[in-house]
Image (spheres, rainbow, N blue to C red):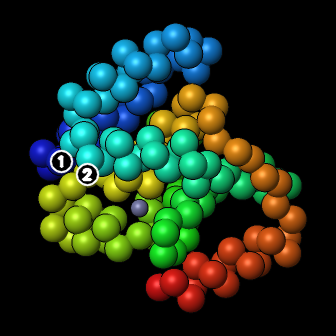
Amino acid sequence: MSHNQGIAQFAYGVIESLDSEDTEDVNDYIERLLFIFPESLLLAALDMIDRENIIKFTTPWGYSQYQAFGSTATYNVFPRVTSGSRKTEPYCTCPSFAFSVMLSKSEYMCKHILAVMISSKLSKCPERSLGPNDLAKIVVMQCSNV
Ligand SMILES: [Zn+2]
């Protein structure tokens, strides 16, 4: 496990440690996140949540996916999934994730993944249900983004 992966695991742990019912703790929680995340990244993520630029889509068969609406593009964010002992690491289709996280490994998370994790934890994420037609549109959009 690389250094960055270690930090990422720790960061996920802090994010997941927040009890979504315990909203009084939000400021305290954000202060804790400031120890791990650069302030600019955290503020950008919180700003996206405030503007409701993060939408959770749920398919009829219970699969969740997020979309992050940026000023120039929309990215698909696949959250971290834990099922049993298997963990799927989060993934985002934005250029920052591809270059800073995957290639140069200078960052361990992009603002979209951070925003998705925080908003779902704070239950501040607007949800939409997806029918098969909507899902097809997302797949098409995703392919044309690449
Ligand atoms: Zn991203």
Disc with the residue nearer the chain's start (1 vs 2): 1
In the picture of the structure, the residue carrying the numbered disc 1 is 4
Q: Is residue 124 above or below residue 59?
A: above
Residue 133 lies in quadrant: bottom right
The residue nearer to you, when weighing 31 against 108, is 31
Give percent across and percent down for residue 80: 48, 46
Q: Secondary structure at mark 2?
A: loop
Give the quarter of the image for residue 28: top left
Task: Tell me the kind of residue under disc 2.
Answer: Tyr
Residue 63 in the image: state x and y as whole percent: 71, 53
Residue 39, percent from left and from top: 25, 40
Q: Is residue 48 above or below residue 141?
A: above
How crowded pointer 1 is (Cα within 10 Å; few <14, some 14-19, many 20+) is rated as some
> Residue 142 in the image: x percent, y percent?
58, 79
- Return the residue at label 2: 108
In the image: residue 106, left or right of residue 136: left
